[in-house]
């Protein structure tokens, strides 16, 4: 079995959520800039920020919903070894002790 390194572990849920929130906030900031630009532009130039303001929320939600790619899955230990002198765990399957 390959020894697992701490760098192989996926980011914690809190870190992943923070990263997604930052990406979403940046996308929404760009959308607000597009809306403000629509107030000052005329003619065909008005179409570009309008498309950005309309389409950007869809892509921002998609971007925020996608988690980070997982490098590998954390491996579970192969077995639990009982320490000498410790009791065996109780079996609640209906067998008498």
Image (tube, helix red, strand yellow):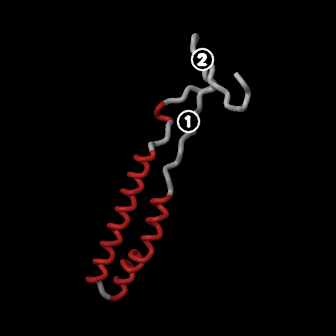
| Residue 53 to residue 9: above or below | below
Q: Residue at x 33, y 75 (%)?
A: 34
Which residue, as the protein is rendered here, is positioned at the far bottom?
Answer: 43
Q: Residues within 10 Å of mark 1 (few under 14, many from 20)?
A: few
| Residue 41 to residue 85: above or below | below
Q: Residue at x 59, y 27 (%)?
A: 77
> Viewed as shown, does residue 84 lie left or right of 59?
right
For mark 1, what is the residue?
Answer: 74
Rendered location of residue 2, percent (x, y): 60, 27
**Label 1 secondary element:** loop
**Label 2 secondary element:** loop
Rendered location of residue 62, percent (x, y): 49, 63
Which residue, as the protein is rendered here, is positioned at the far left?
Answer: 40
Q: Which mark is residue 50?
A: none
Image quadrant in which the N terminus is located: top right
Work out whether residue 95 or residue 50 is closer to the camera in this orientation and state it.
95
Image quadrant in which the C terminus is located: top right
| Residue 24 to residue 44: above or below | above
Q: Residues within 10 Å of mark 2 (few under 14, many from 20)?
A: few
Which residue, as the protein is rendered here, is positioned at the far front?
Answer: 96
The residues bearing labels 1 and 2 have C-alpha atoms spaced at a distance of: 29 Å
For mark 2, what is the residue?
Answer: 87
Q: Residue at x 35, y 71 (%)?
A: 31
Q: Residue at x 72, y 25 (%)?
A: 96
């Amino acid at each position: 079995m390959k020894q697992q390194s701490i760098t192989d572990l996926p980011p914690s849920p809190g870190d992943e959520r923070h990263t997604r929130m930052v990406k979403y906030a940046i996308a929404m900031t760009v959308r607000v800039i597009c809306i403000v630009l629509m107030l000052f532009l005329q003619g065909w130039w008005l179409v570009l920020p309008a498309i950005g303001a309309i389409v950007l929320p869809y892509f921002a939600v998609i971007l925020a919903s996608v988690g980070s790619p997982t490098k590998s899955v954390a491996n579970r230990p192969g077995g639990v070894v009982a320490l000498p002198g410790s009791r065996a765990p109780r079996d609640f399957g209906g067998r008498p002790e």
